[in-house]
Image (spheres, rainbow, N blue to C red):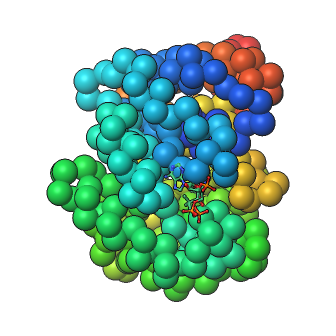
Amino acid sequence: SLPRTVRIVEVGARDGLQNETTEVPTATKIELIERLAAARLRTVEAGAFVSPKKVPQMAGSKEVFRGLERRAGTAYPALVPNMRGFEAAIEAGVTEIAVFVSASEGFSQHNIGCSRAESLDRLRDVADAAAVRNIRMRGYLSCIAGCPYDGAVAPDEVAAMADALVALGCHEISLGDTIGIGTAGQIRNIIERVSAHIALEKLAMHFHDTYGQGVANVLASLQQGITTFDSSVAGLGGCPFAPGASGNVATEDVIYLLAGLGIETGVDLMAVATTGDWISRHLGRSNAARAGKALLAA
Ligand code: HMG
Ligand code: MG
């Protein structure tokens, strides 16, 4: 049976904007985050404290956090790759972090410049520092269904890295199909394999929509007992280190699916759709949220 409620982790302001080629002003980023929170998305990822040379779009994350008007009850996590990023995040007022590793070796090297094993070693300090300060730490695992550099990724490799993130102290593991290549049967197998060791409540699914499988994969995951999904308003994004990958599955499309199934998210779908339309215009890109566009046209 399907869950009654689902939590959406809105990643458009981070996973979405990190891939934009034109510079997005801080004020626009802040307005986007505030509008998403006002639409009652309770987790709105709001930035990344990474190398500005590698991801120029996230260079202003400090200013974003400083300028953000926060709503009580909404979490605004930020990506942190190392101690330098952790310290910068804390200074900017971040209270929840996300660390990120890859299930494949090739993407690890391209994304963060080190091996999988080394990435886990590097994150130990971050995990310790977060634990000392009582800061919740989410763990992202990329390339669960395939890697742009290595090709196929075995579910065993995914499970091993997911276990390592739990051992590091992550309260939640987000399993990312970075290049949006997975199909429902494959996703089911991965969830089955990973959830043999990790409680379903600790798992989130993070789909990119490159092959148009996002919503189908959300449904397959729901049927496996997953209750947390990452998505991005207007389907924004891609990944600078995964050439050709398109944006995340659109928040509007996911909520439309869930609403039809009678699953509560607490999110105001029309407010997200309007925000998706607004940010798409701002970025001069077409709105990739099919449900968002249809609702606004209706
Ligand atoms: P590195 O190049 O391996 O090593 O960086 P480094 O320590 O020599 O750093 C290189 C430069 O970055 C140096 O500057 C450092 O000072 C600086 P330079 O000496 O050349 O002038 N630096 C930093 N600057 C600001 N903040 C920091 C920081 N750390 C070092 N925290 C590092 C290692 C991981 C930092 C780098 O490779 C990096 O930032 N990579 C970017 C990774 C990234 O943000 N990727 C996108 C997010 S992950 C994702 O999108 C996937 C996800 O959505 C899930 C999915 O879909 O799969 C989460
Ligand atoms: Mg992603």
Q: Which quadrant does the N terminus fall into?
A: bottom left
Residue drawn at 58 percent across, 38 percent down: 59
In which quarter of the view is residue 34 placed? top left
Q: Can residue 284 be seen in this view?
A: yes
Residue 135 located left or right of residue 97: left
Q: Quadrant of residue 265?
A: top left
Q: Is residue 294 visible?
A: no
137 vs 237: above or below = below
| Quarter of the rendering containing residue 56 | top right
The residue at the point 47 percent across, 58 percent down is 81
The quadrant of the picture occupied by the C terminus is top right
Above or below, comparing residue 191 to residue 41 in the picture: below
**Residue 267: image location, x then y, percent:** 43, 27
* Total labels drawn: 0
Q: Toward the viewer: 200 or 86? A: 86
Looking at the picture, how far across and down is residue 159, in whole percent? 46, 79
Residue 265 versus residue 181: which sits nearer the camera? 181
Between 296 and 283, the one nearer to me in the picture: 283
What residue lies at 59% left-to-right and 64% top-to-bottom? 112
At which x and y percent is residue 115? 57, 79
Residue at figure coordinates x 56%, y 70% from the top left: 102
